[in-house]
Image (tube, rainbow, N blue to C red):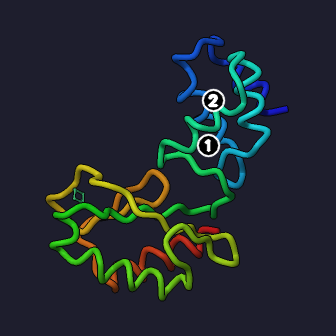
Amino acid sequence: MYREQIIKKFNPTLDNILYILHDLQDNNPEHYLAKQDIRICADYLKVPYSYVQSVASFYTMFSLKPRGRNIIRLCDSPPCHLMGSQSLLDYLKKALKVNVGGTTEDKAFTLELTSCLGACGVAPVMMINEEMFGNLTPAAVDAILDKRRKEL
Ligand code: FES
């Protein structure tokens, strides 16, 4: 039901496809585009299902599989690399017991990589959902994860 309410906020024109997909994903409790999301978007825009699916799979900001409540996006661009993002990635993998693209068993976190987040001055950087964190260290990451776990 919520899907119909979402898409009706937009005109049924192809230039709205990314806005529609964003809104559908943001409102999916598992933070991804389910087949029903792709289908309703395709029907609304009167394009083939495969067209919408190819758009959704092209952009890394969309996921086609369920994700956790907190989506961690660690910057994987060279300035953050130089400031230690690779060792932070190893730390996050160990702390969360997941690989890149994986979701923790309790569905609390999904670990992803992203290109530059535009905050290179405070590298290494990661985002969790819409919040940015810079000058990261393993201790800072621990504190952030603990705080997020308590908020669940
Ligand atoms: S390179 Fe990481 S924020 Fe720019």
* Residue 11 drawn at (x, y percent): 63, 11
Q: Nearer the viewer, residue 27 or 86?
A: 86
Residue at 42% x, 61% y: name it: 73
In the figure, is residue 99 to the left or right of 21? left
Q: Residues within 10 Å of mark 2 (few under 14, many from 20)?
A: few
The residue singled out by tag 2 in the image is: 51
* Residue 40 drawn at (x, y percent): 77, 28
* Residue 25 drawn at (x, y percent): 63, 42
Residue at 25% x, 61% y: name it: 77
Amino acid found under the numbered disc labelled 1? Asp
Residue at 53% x, 29% y: name it: 18
Q: Nearer the viewer, residue 116 or 143?
A: 116
- Image quadrant in which you'd find residue 120: bottom left
Is the residue indicated by label 2 positioned so its CB lies within 8 Å of ligand 1?
no
Residue at 52% x, 77% y: name it: 99
In the figure, is residue 114 to the left or right of 77? right
* Residue 50 drawn at (x, y percent): 68, 33
SS type, badge 2 = helix
- In which quadrant is the C terminus drawn? bottom right
Q: Which mark is residue 127?
A: none
Vertical placement of residue 105 versus 33, above or below: below
Q: Decide which of tag 2 and tag 1 comes sooner along the chain.
A: 1
Name, please, the residue furthest toward the right.
1
Q: How many marks?
A: 2
Is the residue indicated by label 1 positioned so its CB lies within 8 Å of ligand 1?
no
The residue singled out by tag 1 in the image is: 26
In the figure, is residue 115 to the left or right of 70? left
Q: Nearer the viewer, residue 42 or 133?
A: 42
Amino acid found under the numbered disc labelled 2? Tyr
- In which quadrant is the N terminus drawn? top right
Ligand 1 position by quadrant: bottom left
SS type, badge 1 = helix
